Image (cartoon, rainbow, N blue to C red):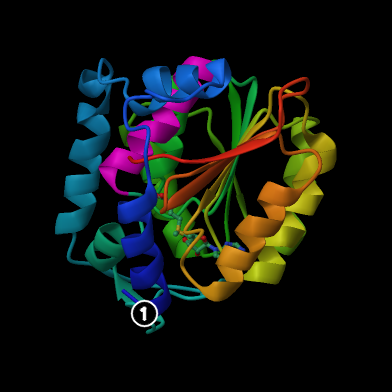
Amino acid sequence: MNFFLAKKTLHYFFCARHKYGHGIHSPFVYDFVRNVLRNTNTQAEYAPIERRRKELCRRKDRIEVLDLGAGSTQLRTKTRAVSDIARTSLSPKKYAQLLHNSALHYQPRTMLELGTSLGVSTVYMVSGYPLARCITLEGAPEIAAIARETFAVCCKPLIELIEGNFNNTLPQALEQLEYVDFAFIDGNHQKEATLDYFQKILPYCNERSVLVFDDIYWSKGMCAAWQEICAHEQVSISIDLCKLGIVFLRKGIEKQHFTIRY
Ligand SMILES: C[S@@+](CC[C@H](N)C(=O)[O-])C[C@H]1O[C@@H](n2cnc3c(N)ncnc32)[C@H](O)[C@@H]1O
């Protein structure tokens, strides 16, 4: 863990509150805490996905990785063991469950993911609301091939994966989706890139849109991007969970920011 992230994580653990929603006056955020963060009724649905994660963690093969993003803090080589990617790059179970519960609760008609990796977070999201149309974007072809295996193994053949640099594939995905109800931005963790993706996605959003940003305290740049996103006039509710930041664009509710213990 880098020094900046360590400092921010420590600060979060001292300052985050409202673990069970007590003391939150916003009915919308209280509902989020109770039905998304604290929903433990969906555990059984994760079993096949976690089996796939375990399988990936045990794989011995190495693949060529085209690194188009900010790069992993732990792995910099161009060939990587699949098991290392599975252990270091995927959303941990707890945060993947949050994506699942969000989809289950808000029932987005469309889902967009920037950064498929091995497909685990994608399958978590889609299994929360299988009726959604989901497009996920991945730049490294050999990683994308394993993600496709994950979709097949977890019986989610309708997930659409577009391969290529986000700079080219994001406009294409937005055009295909027409609107974005739910987005998980989890790749190329750099300030300018993150703000650019946010700006590109915004015109396709509506008042039910939910945008989730990963690694908001990964670096000073990501922290600055997160603060700019929270301050944006279209963002009404922003929620800081330290690893993830979530923003809602609901109209007619007071602009508020929450740091919630998760
Ligand atoms: C952190 S991983 C995604 C993890 C995945 N969402 C999960 O939680 O299981 C980020 C992925 O984004 C991809 N990526 C990063 N920058 C990219 C870019 N500019 N264009 C396309 N893909 C990119 C990387 O190849 C990597 O597989």
* Residue for point 48% across, 76% down: 71
Which sits in the foreground, 151 or 49? Answer: 49
In the displayed structure, would residue 159 be above or below residue 13? above
Q: Is residue 104 magenta?
A: yes
Local packing at callout 1 (Cα closer than 10 Å; few below 14, some 14-19, many 20+) is: few
Q: Secondary structure at mark 1?
A: helix
Quarter of the image where the C terminus is located: top left
In the displayed structure, would residue 260 be above or below residue 140? above
Q: Which residue is mark 1?
A: 3
Q: Amino acid at mark 1?
A: Phe
| x and y percentages locating residue 237 in the rendered image | 63, 34
Which sits in the foreground, 179 or 231? Answer: 231
Q: Is residue 134 magenta?
A: no
| Residue 188 seen in the figure | no
Occupied quadrant, residue 226 = bottom right
Residue extent of the magenta highlight: 92-107
Which sits in the foreground, 93 or 215? Answer: 215
Would you say 119 lies left or right of 220 here? left
| x and y percentages locating residue 161 in the rendered image | 57, 44
The outermost residue toward the right is 203
Would you say 148 lies left or right of 97 here? right
| x and y percentages locating residue 180 in the rendered image | 71, 32
Quarter of the image where the N terminus is located: bottom left
| Residue 25 seen in the figure | yes
Q: Which SS does the magenta portion mostly show?
A: helix
* Residue for point 44% across, 34% down: 99
* Residue for point 42% across, 75% down: 4
